[in-house]
Image: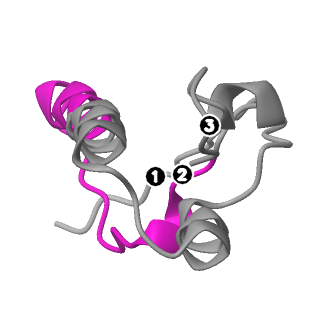
Amino acid sequence: MLVQFSVCQAMELCTGGELFDRIIEVGQFTEKDAAIVMQQMLSAVFYMHKRQVCHRDLKPENFLFLTLAAVYMGRDSWI
């Protein structure tokens, strides 16, 4: 038996840009900045997996920063 259903997704407006753009802009992250970003990414994926949601296209272009302020880590670098 084939069951059809729809999934709707609502997101906040993320004006901080993509992770990919930030990588290109900065060139490379410090180890500390990379660790912070990776922890946030893995936390988001874990949250989805706990709710049995699978993201099939994980790449830097699909990770968004909420605001530009969220991109600035309080040091001399923007990530």
Q: Residues within 10 Å of mark 2 (few under 14, many from 20)?
A: few
Residue 29 in the image: state x and y as whole percent: 39, 57
Q: Is residue 31 above or below residue 69?
A: below
Element assignment for label 1 = loop
Q: Assess whether residue 21 is covered by the magenta stretch.
A: no
Amino acid at dot 3: Asp
Amino acid at dot 1: Phe
How far apart are labels 2 and 3 at the CA level? 45 Å
| Residue of label 3 | 76
Q: From the viewer's side, name the closer residue of 54 and 57.
A: 57
Residue 78 in the image: state x and y as whole percent: 64, 45
Q: Assess whether residue 57 is covered by the magenta stretch.
A: yes
Whichever of callouts 1 and 3 sits on the residue coming sooner in the sequence is 1
Element assignment for label 3 = loop
Which numbered mark, 1 or 3, is in the foreground of this view?
Answer: 3
Q: Which residues are magenta?
A: 43-64
Residue 1 in the image: state x and y as whole percent: 16, 66
| Residue of label 1 | 5
Q: Residue at x 62, y 41 (%)?
A: 9
How far apart are labels 1 and 2 at the CA level? 4 Å
Residue 71 in the image: state x and y as whole percent: 65, 37
Whether pointer 1 and pointer 2 mark residues with C-beta atoms closer than 8 Å, the reply is yes
Amino acid at dot 2: Ser
Q: Residue at x 36, y 40 (%)?
A: 33
Q: Residue at x 71, y 32 (%)?
A: 66
How far apart are labels 1 and 3 at the CA level? 48 Å
Relative side of 12 to 34, left or right:
right
Q: Looking at the rendering, which quadrant does residue 59 occupy?
A: bottom left
Q: Looking at the rendering, which quadrant does residue 19 occupy?
A: bottom right
Whether pointer 1 and pointer 3 mark residues with C-beta atoms closer than 8 Å, the reply is no
